[in-house]
Amino acid sequence: MPDHAPSADGDRLRGQREFLRKWSSAPEQAAQRIANARVLVVGLEPWGASAALALAGAGVSALRLIDGGAVGPRDVAVVRARGEAALGGPRRGAVAALIREHAPLCRVDESSSAALEGGDLLSPEGRPHLLVAAVRGDDAELLERVARFGHRAGIASLFSHLAGTTAVLGPLVFPGKTACRICATTEALNPSLAARSLAEPAPHAGTMGQLLGHLVAMEALKVLSAYTPSRLGGRFLIQDLATLETSHHTLVRLPWCKVCGEG
């Protein structure tokens, strides 16, 4: 969690304090953790962009956006703000521009996925307090790279994806303590995410992505501020966004996992 360093944010955190006062016995400290937080967002699918914008609006100190995609029709946060002229442009640049416009006090940087193999992300002044992974569930190669980075760096990681009308939030991974996202791919012992990952995009995938993005941001704020405990450590939540049917599933940490295993 972020340090409790003093801040001159003043009224900028008033709304956060009022919200946190209803949940926490120490709202000032929780709000300050948010104000000091640095978050790494890998993947700017619609839910990732929505989460990044929400976290910036909530007052986090800095965001690093990693993405290699182009703006498409389902990237509703960008298209609504910039119109069809934005289509085809770099997604991370478009989302970064929106954050700078709507949350100018949040420092935002952009990188390609190659940054996951470098050391710049872990510099003392830029090391993230949380990794938020908003990667398509069928992008196995990128999911493994993200999981390896989080495990190697010892950074808590919150995964999410959207498959059809089904939102999957989690797992929240605490390296060395809980099952990782790659453990979740072993269907013999863990609940299967594979079928959900391969579902066709829903007609309103962009709007549903925004809904999932808000869930991601709220869960991230729990981790960053500690205003209330997260229930997703080593677990994931599945919600049908059409019916709102919701379930929780616990993952088994696998000793032979190629990312977090002990062997």
Image (cartoon, rainbow, N blue to C red):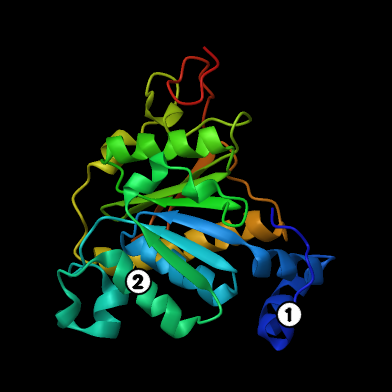
Mark drawn on residue 18? 1
Nearest to N terminus: mark 1 or mark 2: 1
Query: Label 2 amino acid?
Result: Val
Q: Residue at x 44, y 33 (%)?
A: 148
Mark drawn on residue 55? none
Q: Is residue 250 visible from the viewing direction of this image?
A: no
| Residue sticking out furthest to the bottom | 11
Mark drawn on residue 95? 2
Measuring from the top left, give residue 201's x and y in whole percent. 20, 55
For this view, does 78 lie left or right of residue 221? left
| Residue sticking out furthest to the top | 263
Who is closer to the viewer here, 115 or 67?
Answer: 115
Q: Secondary structure at mark 2?
A: helix
Q: Residue at x 22, y 59 (%)?
A: 202
Task: Check disc 1: other Cα within 10 Å, few if <14, some if 14-19, many if 20+.
Answer: few
Q: Residue at x 25, y 63 (%)?
A: 205
Measuring from the top left, give residue 56's x and y in whole percent. 52, 72
Rounded to the nearest angstrom, the CA distance separating label 1 from label 2 is 28 Å
Measuring from the top left, give residue 82's x and y in whole percent. 25, 83
Q: Quadrant of residue 213?
A: bottom left
Q: Residue at x 61, y 57 (%)?
A: 125
Query: Label 1 amino acid?
Result: Glu
Who is closer to the viewer here, 225 or 9?
Answer: 9
Measuring from the top left, give residue 12's x and y in whole percent. 66, 84
| Residue sticking out furthest to the right | 25
Of circles 1 and 2, which is in front? Answer: 2
In the depicted structure, whether residue 219 falls above or below residue 7: above
Give the total of numbered labels: 2
In the depicted structure, whether residue 46 falls above or below residue 56: above
Q: Secondary structure at mark 1?
A: helix
Q: Is residue 225 visible from the viewing direction of this image?
A: yes
